Amino acid sequence: MDEYERIYGRHADFFGAAPEPLLERFADGIEAGGRVLDIGAGQGRNALWLAERGFRVTALEPAGVAARQLAARSRRPGTIEVVEAAVEDYQPEYALAAVLCFGVIQVLTVRQREVMAGRVTTWLEPGGLLLVTAFSIRDPSYARWSRRAQIVGRHCLRTAEGVVRAYLEPGEILELFPRLEVVHHREGLGPWHRHAGGEPERHELIEAVFRRRP
């Protein structure tokens, strides 16, 4: 996670302060006051937003600098549990009302992605929601990364420095979670946004919401 250690160390709110739009749209479907796991929580834009609305959040973040930043920013001690770990090294002690997986799939190898998908499915309580975003192979960055990185799996690339970028084919997100009910699925251009004051950009984004059947 050296890439993100550098990014978070240089920029506050690198991904912005507002929560993921998909979370805002579907938060009402999460059990009130329920336990939520935010995988790859970063500097906390989603975890903090949920905590302010009464949810009990575990923020899972492997980049130490971001984990420390989030712990310091939590306004209500005890509401957000910050765990400095990768998803493959984590096991919750309780069933979850929701799991957030925003911006995570694109930094995992194919094997890591498959392991995460299988584990997350079992962590949800009946009726619990899984909210996911990923990059499509239609995103322009896929061609750029293909020119500078080695292929290490289907649409998965890794640089000489070990930085991974992975992309999904159309509809592939549904194959990752076959045991869950599909609540929402959309593939297309995402919203315009900036990173740390950079140029506006948007991605060919895959988003989905799944529910564990009762």
Image (spheres, rainbow, N blue to C red):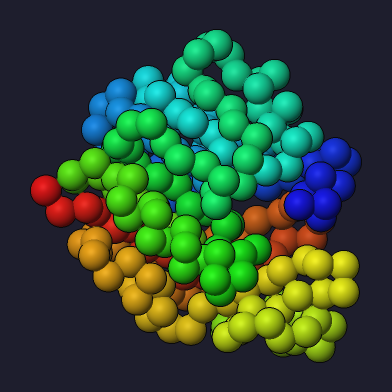
Question: How many marks do you count on the picture?
Answer: 0
Which residue is pictured at 45% across the width and 40% down the height?
A: 91
- Mark yes or no: residue 45 visible: no
59 in relation to 102, above or below: above
Query: Which of 68/32 is in front?
Result: 68
- 210 sits left or right of 66 in the view: left
- Mark yes or no: residue 79 visible: yes
- 158 sits left or right of 103 in the view: right
Which residue is pictured at 47% across the width and 75% down the height?
A: 188
Which residue is pictured at 65% across the width and 56% down the height?
A: 193
44 in relation to 72, above or below: below
- 33 sits left or right of 139 in the view: left
Whole-percent x and y of residue 149? Answer: 80, 81
Q: Residue furthest left?
A: 214
49 in relation to 145, above or below: above
Query: Which of 1/33 is in front?
Result: 1
Whole-percent x and y of residue 135? Answer: 56, 71
Figure quadrant of residue 16? top right
Which residue is pictured at 55% across the width and 11% down the height?
A: 77
Query: Which of 120/75 is in front?
Result: 120
- 209 sits left or right of 91 in the view: left
Whole-percent x and y of residue 14? Answer: 74, 45
Whole-percent x and y of residue 10? Answer: 88, 41
Q: Residue furthest top?
A: 77
